[in-house]
Image: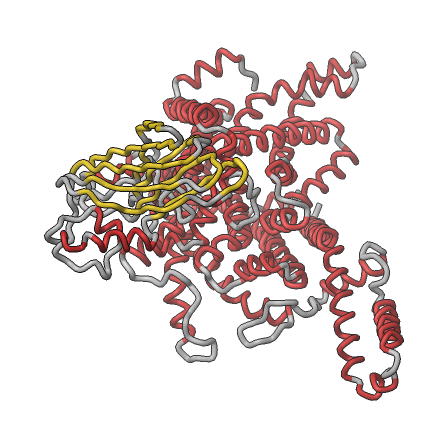
Amino acid sequence: MSFSKKEIWKEFSRNNIGLAGIGIIFALFGLSILAFLTIPVETFREWNDPASWLSYPKSALPVWTNYFLPQKVPEHLILLPFTSIQKSSDITAFTNLFFVDYQYDSFPSDFIYQYDAKYTGSPLVTISVTRPDGMELELISTSLPSSTTESKFTGMIFSTDDSIKKNLKNSSDRFSFSFDTISSGDIVFSKPDQNRILKGHYIFKVTIYDVGGNISLDQSRFILGGKVYGLMGTDDLRRDLAVGLLWGTPLALFIGITVSIVSVILGLVYGVFAGFKGKITDEAMMRFNDIIWAMPVLPLLIILAVTVGNSIFLIVGFLVIFGWVGIAKVSRSMALQIKTLQYVEASKLMGQKDFKIIFKHILPQLLPYAFASIAISVPAAITAEAGLSFLGLGDPTFPTWGQILHDASSYGAATRGLWWWIVPPGVMIAITGLAFVFIGHAMDTIVNPKLRR
Amino acid sequence: MGFAKYLAKRAVTMFGVLMATLLVTVALVGANMDAILKQSVAIDVRTAMINNKPLVESFKNHPEELEKYIQNQIKQEIISLGIDQPWYTPSRLGLAMYKILTLNFGHAKFLTSDTGSSDVKDIILEKLPRTILLFTTATVIVSILGIFLGAIAASKVNSKIDKITSAFAVISSSFPVWWVGLLMIFAFAFIYPIFPARATPTVPVTDPGYFVSLLYHMTLPLITIVLIGFGSWSYIVRNFLIGILQEDFITAKRAAGIDKRKILYSHALKNAAPPIITVLAFGLSGSLGGSIITEAVFDWPGMGRLYYEAITVLDLPVIIGETYVLTAFFLVSIFLADILYGYFDPRVRRQ
């Protein structure tokens, strides 16, 4: 029954499936580190704040789907400006130039100019566009919201703005089709003779004039709304799914590993103690174990989450409550065997204290089994948390995979065909679970001689 | 220890589990329950008073006196119902447990049955057959498929079919059932609209075609549960069978020249039956608990969805009643497994 570390590793390294499991887990840890490094913690705090996702497209496909589609669907483009400042006597003019080479086969869904500016008074903004065919269109000329104190404004100018449509109507004689039912975006990107996309280089010019010179422009962006975005696409709430999926990795690993380690330790100590003590103690402890074992887990988990609370740490605790029982049963029966071994009897006769015998002579014998059961019980914990989150009872402040699937299901993603919202989170859950199952399986074949062949 | 004694001991444990689960549930929702009860008593008393015209008339010139009188009446009503004491006093706890044990769950706060009754017992009795229909059918299909495939795999260890079954088992059991459910809805309700996305039949319950419609709507959830279940199930059967096939008595039978297939299906399978039955019972009861999520995904009008709805609107009488019925079913299936175990394995009886 005993194994040396070297022996175990030797056996393990011969097991391809186990090595594959280790490989996947290293990859998942890599993803977690990537999440910590590339996505600031604030971003995932803002996961549930719709305001912070405004500049993203709504339910956009992942970018790579363009490779498989016959027509190139417009990508969601966020353009950054080339800024120049002109000062003449008391007028300051900020000019933002946005260049884009538009080569997609359909119109952008809309365009938005977004700015962060600090000013007093009410500066004037004009936006115009130079098209690939050389035509120049005045889009809008408006003043920013007036302010008496110097304060910071974050504002947006949308292509759906009525005055853009009005301005475009002034040049309707240059187009040979009627503007009535067409949105401003479709006109700007249209060929003059028919309402088809005109490909090529567009230059959007935004100029802000300010009298007095107290203006500073912190950040400005020009967004061309598209139908594909990022590696993983976006959901109905405009959230970048790549962020959620990436952050889900450390969360799932944390939940799975914490729950399994704590429950295995609890179960081991409980079971070994009961088995070693025997008699009444054993009987009482095992009846209690039976009671917890036969309880319906999911209904009780749900009631606990609803009444006690649903913070991620509480959920880990709830999962531990139901997680230790099976391990306690097995480790008790193992302890019953080890107890009768001569060296344990000997140390008993030598008058060693009970807890010393348990911790020094019995528990170390169970370590290989403990590692195997830690690995095997991780997927159950991850799936249970995902299930709770899927029912909407998880911790809403963390974007776990279950949480993403909950949102997908409540927005009817399956019936609307938004597969990129459903498939990746489930695949991540399955891959993570599989990795631990592989390792557990490999450990099991080492620990359990019956399975060796 | 005789088998009867063994069963009696198990029965006592099961009853203990039932009581413990109920106690935990009542303890967790008790405080909320009290607040809701008190509120509803207050509303009942107030409407009764206001509708009592002569009474209101007699207090015509003293509205604050009327208010005082109503408050007094509410207080008395609460005392007479015994809910002035907190829920954890022994008498109230005993009464609550007694009521639940006798299936008296009271009335639901928000939810009603399809026929409009708000009695929790009616609601549960209406949903229960549907859940049993779906999950028993699924379990029967899964176990037949599983035993058959498992036996084939065990008879040809390390063959191609064995490897495929094992791989399928490991992979399929890592996917959450409800996620596969979402994929199935996507595939068979969106891309190929063969089955309805929502499993609730569109025809009313009273319609004669209701049952047929129910069966049609059941197909997609049924396929999903079977697809996810039979792989791991056949893997379990395979592992038990491999253990048995290594035993000496099988070798002896082989040496005696008994047909291989006969050894596998009648001798080996019979000896592997006890652990298989235990796992089957646990699978069945486990899927009942899991029905909460599965039914929520498919919108199947059974116990699981009822539980989900009750949780979302916090309908406490329904939650308590459901927990009781689910736990009872769970325990009955474990208990049945115990009896069958004893039937198939005489060692348990003669212990």
Q: Is residue A357 above or below residue A112?
A: above
Residue A330 found in image quarter = top right
Picture residue at 37% right of the left edge, 45% below the top: A157
Residue A60 found in image quarter = top left
Place of residue B7 in the rendered image (x, y in percent of width and height, measured from the top left): 67, 51
Q: Is residue A134 above or below residue A22?
A: below
Q: Along the horizontal axis of the image, is A433 left or right of A290?
A: left
Picture residue at 29% right of the left edge, 44% below the top: A226
Q: Along the horizontal axis of the image, is B339 left or right of A405?
A: right
Residue B12 visible in this rendered orientation of the protein: no
Q: Along the horizontal axis of the image, is B240 left or right of A16?
A: right
Closer-to-camera residue (A256/B153)? A256
Colour setting: secondary structure
Question: For the view shown, which residue lies furthest in the front direction?
Answer: A89
Closer-to-camera residue (B18/B196)? B196
Residue A120 visible in this rendered orientation of the protein: yes
Place of residue B349 in the rendered image (x, y in percent of width and height, measured from the top left): 63, 47
Specify the quadrant that holds the C terminus of chain B.
Answer: top right
Tell how many labels.
0
Closer-to-camera residue (A112/B273)? A112
Question: For the view shown, which residue lies furthest in the bottom direction?
Answer: B54
Picture residue at 71% right of the left edge, 49% below the top: B13
Specify the quadrant that holds the N terminus of chain B.
Answer: top right
Closer-to-camera residue (A80/A38)? A80
